[in-house]
Amino acid sequence: MLVSSTPKDLRSLAGWQSCAATIGNFDGVHLGHRELLRRTVDCARHEGMPAVVVTFDPHPAAVFTEYPPRLLCSREQCLELLEELGVDAVLLMPFTRELAEQSAESFCRRVLQDELGVKELFVGYDFRLGCDQAGAARMRDFGTYSLTQVEAVMAGDAPVSSTRIRKALAEGRLDEANALLGRPFSVRGEVVHGAGRGGPLLGVPTANLDLADAQAMPAPAAYATSARLLDGPEEERFWRMAVTSFCKNPTFDGTHLTLETHILDFQGDIYGRQLEVRFMGELRKEKRFNGLDALIAQLKADMDQRRGMPL
């Protein structure tokens, strides 16, 4: 999959005359995004054109507010998910105040029509573009492409959205968040040294992840997870059963949240390596235990419960 920050370069590298494209933020690549992408890819295959995604980095809200919404996936994860769904190329445009000040018509004619050669354009039900916040009805007049507005994907009585997924995660409704994503929620980070209690004190070695500040997280709890290494030998990069604690370690009077993952039936030094943790289900709420013996017994029960669940 080709990725470029410049539309002319992207089109030149691929050598296409025209393309089918969609445009948006795609934070999480959730069920609503997947329907939009499916329509775009299906059209591209039918017409014999590449399927192109136009998106932005950072999230536009990060440019206009001091506290933007936390992200459901990293840019790297987003690109991998887009490729899995059949996207051929991504225009990853730096989002700046200068770009935000452009009108929708200017962007559509210059970037989409002239530089990318968009023939078929797909946008979401609530998409708005440019400083004038033009929607699909107006965007149809801003280029020679054909524009299709894709209806919302509903879950219950409300559309699937990144905002709804972040809220479900924060409120401890992991099953709902996973259902809206269409996949298990996951995070990635570097394995770093923690307090050193897991292996020496508890007999349960854990991988502590250094997470990006902008990363969305589930509610504090103990979770059934799966984990995989993202670097190193290819034969090591497969999913393994795991148990993850995302809490303040109240038994040890902790003061800040940490993400600690015990990978079942695994031994090895993975400090400094990249690890992905996939949240499959909640095992129990955060709890303070009356001594080490009670905590160790609970950790063993957590591991036993995890073994009885799907990978």
Image: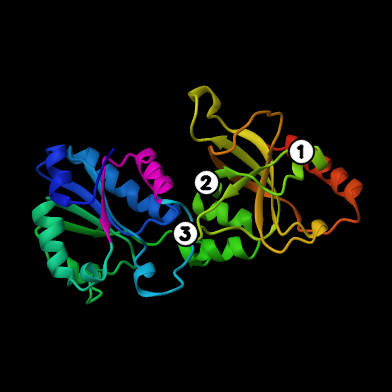
Where is residue 23 shown, x and y percent of the image? 27, 57
Asked which secondary structure carries label 1, the reply is helix
Disc 3 crowd rating (10 Å Cα; few below 14, some 14-19, many 20+) is: some
Give the residue type that dot 3 points to.
Answer: Leu
Residue behind mark 2: 188
In the image, is residue 303 part of the stretch drawn in magenta? no
Asked which secondary structure carries label 3, the reply is loop
Where is residue 165 shown, x and y percent of the image? 52, 61
Residue behind mark 3: 71
Give the residue type that dot 1 points to.
Answer: Gly
Mark 2 or mark 3, which is nearer the start of the sequence?
3
Q: Residue 199 carries which label?
A: 1
Measured in 3D between alpha carbons, the distance from the residue under mark 3 to the one under mark 2, in whole angstroms, is 12 Å
User: Of discs 3 and 2, which sits in the foreground?
Assistant: 2
Mark 3 or mark 1, which is nearer the start of the sequence?
3
Mark 2 or mark 1, which is nearer the start of the sequence?
2
Residue 57 vs residue 86, the one in the foreground: 57
User: Of discs 1 and 3, which sits in the foreground?
Assistant: 1
| Quarter of the figure with the C terminus | top right
Residue 272 vs residue 235, the one in the foreground: 272
Magenta residue span: 75-94
Measured in 3D between alpha carbons, the distance from the residue under mark 1 to the one under mark 2, in whole angstroms, is 22 Å
**Point 20% across, 48% down: residue:** 20
Residue 37 vs residue 132, the one in the foreground: 132
